[in-house]
Amino acid sequence: MRVREFAWPDYDDVAALWTGTGRDVLSRAELTAKLARDPQLFLVAEVSEAVVGVVLGTYDGRRGMILRLAVAPAHRRGGVATALVAELERRFAALGCPRVNLLVLPKDTAALRFWQALGYVPQPDVLCSKPLSG
């Protein structure tokens, strides 16, 4: 397995992975805007040149955020997610990022256990969001 930075030829494979794991797909326009800011924080994992995992990180200069971690079902429990997160954390540290946040749905106990095993601590905060139209 190899973890590397996302490249545009990966887009269709990443979109299929997100779709196959029940996540929304970022449009090319959204992704273009994200990549203009911190392209080194969008990672893919590949096995035999096939994309089997993906994670999207963002850094606003104050906090890092981990988003859209997904691993192909056939490659779960093989260290793919752990490797993606470890590389993303290394890249956050290189940017001087002091803290990383992420969101886990309370009912997703498997995800909560995964993140806790990596040292992430649940917080009692409540997230509120509002989509903005441009």
Image: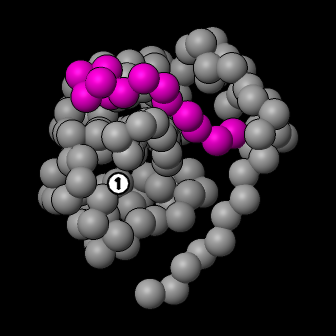
Left or right for 40, reference 71:
left
| Residue that appears at 45% across and 36% down | 63
In the picture shown, does residue 11 fall above or below 62?
A: below
Front residue of 128/79: it is: 128
**Residue at position x 59%, y 75% in the image:** 131
At 51% across and 86% down in the image, what residue appears?
Answer: 133
Q: Is residue 83 visible?
A: no
Please state the total of marks drawn on the protein image: 1
The answer to whether residue 4 is left or right of residue 110 is left
Q: What x and y, as percent, mark residue 46?
A: 26, 34
83 or 100: nearer the viewer: 100
Magenta-colored stretch includes residue 74:
no
Asked if residue 31 can be seen in this view, the reply is: yes
Q: Is residue 132 above or below residue 3?
A: below
State how the image is colored: one colour
Amino acid type, residue under disc 1 in the picture: Val
The magenta region covers 91-104
Name which quarter of the figure residue 4 lies in.
Answer: top left
**Badge 1: how crowded within 10 Å, few (<14), some, or many (20+)?**
many
Look at the picture and state if 39 lies above or below 3: below
Task: Say what secondary structure mark 1 lies in.
Answer: helix
Nearer-the-camera pick, 101 or 80: 101
Q: Residue at x 29, y 40 (%)?
A: 41
From the image, tell me which residue sits under label 1.
14
The quadrant the N terminus occupies is top left
Q: Is residue 103 magenta?
A: yes
In the rendered image, the quadrant that contains the C terminus is: bottom left
Nearer to me, 109 or 17: 109
The location of residue 87, given as percent across then percent down, is 31, 23
On screen, residue 14 above or below 119: below
Locate residue 83: give its quadrant.
top left
Residue 85 in the image: state x and y as whole percent.
42, 25
